[in-house]
Amino acid sequence: MSTEMKRRIFLKRSLAAGTVGIAAAAGLLAPQQILAAWNKAAFESKELSGALDALLGSSDMAASADITVKAPDIAENGAVVPVTIDAGMDGVESIAVIASNNPVPLVAHFIMGPGATGFVSTRIKMGKTGDIIGVVKAGGKLYSAKKEVKVTIGGCGG
Amino acid sequence: MAKSIKIRAKESGGITTVKALMSHPMETGGRKDSKTGKLIPAHFIQEVTCKHKGNTVMTAMWSGGISKNPYISFKFSGGAKGDELELAWKDNKGKSDSMSSTIK
């Protein structure tokens, strides 16, 4: 996908997000910052589908064998769970990391710029045993893969 | 503010792998202080951007679900040895920091 096409998609998205559109109209944000607006609704949603709807406009996703979610089978310490998501497909636009049983399921959303490959690695907190879901947006469609992680000590409260 | 970011970038076969560590408490806002029983206010990095020669190669939006002292790694193509790379973060209290490094 060309850079120009990506730009069109980004523009459409930013228009869809009302508050961001208003901020842009007021000239408060440079174009690059519009893309980088933090999605409050998505990150505060307690429901997985609600978070995905707010973040990506849809929660319909197809399971894909091209995505690898690498995480330990058993996490002794839920406060630090290493996660790597590797998407083998071309044209990855964004990768969302979800811990299904966390109080706030959406943990992170990585937006890939031109040239970035579908690979991210980070460390997340997990409140209790649950699935780590990697949702990859590529070519306007959502794909996902998941891995269950058993947590012995939760990392989200206390 | 002391520099809170460590960043390393290595180019190999056309792909640049970036690894970065930030020091930050990453409080979710849902945790209680064990002494006072009061909630510790949320304090976490919301946004991380990485720029290669002025172009944003990756933007990360985070919730408090990222571990304390966050680690991030990602890859991109188009980088060359010696190119400058800048990583910046911004948290929910409006604090920010940035760090530049060169690709090795």
Image: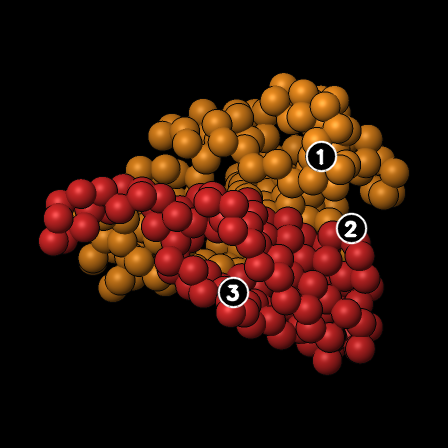
Chain colours: A orange, B red
Image height check: is B34 above or below A32? below
- Chain letter of the residue beneath label 1 in the structure image: A
* Residue B54: x %, y % from top left: 80, 57
Please give the label number shown on residue A114.
2
Q: Nearer the viewer, residue B60 or A78?
A: B60
What quarter of the picture does the N terminus of chain A occupy?
A: top right
Q: Residue at x 65, y 40 (%)?
A: A36
For label 1, the residue is A29
For label 3, the residue is B1
Secondary element at image label 3: loop
Q: Are marks 2 and 3 in contact (CB under 8 Å)?
A: no
Q: Amino acid at mark 3?
A: Met
* Residue A65: x %, y % from top left: 56, 48
Image height check: is A149 above or below A99? below
Secondary element at image label 1: loop
* Residue A54: x %, y % from top left: 53, 26
Which residue is the extreme one toward the front?
B1
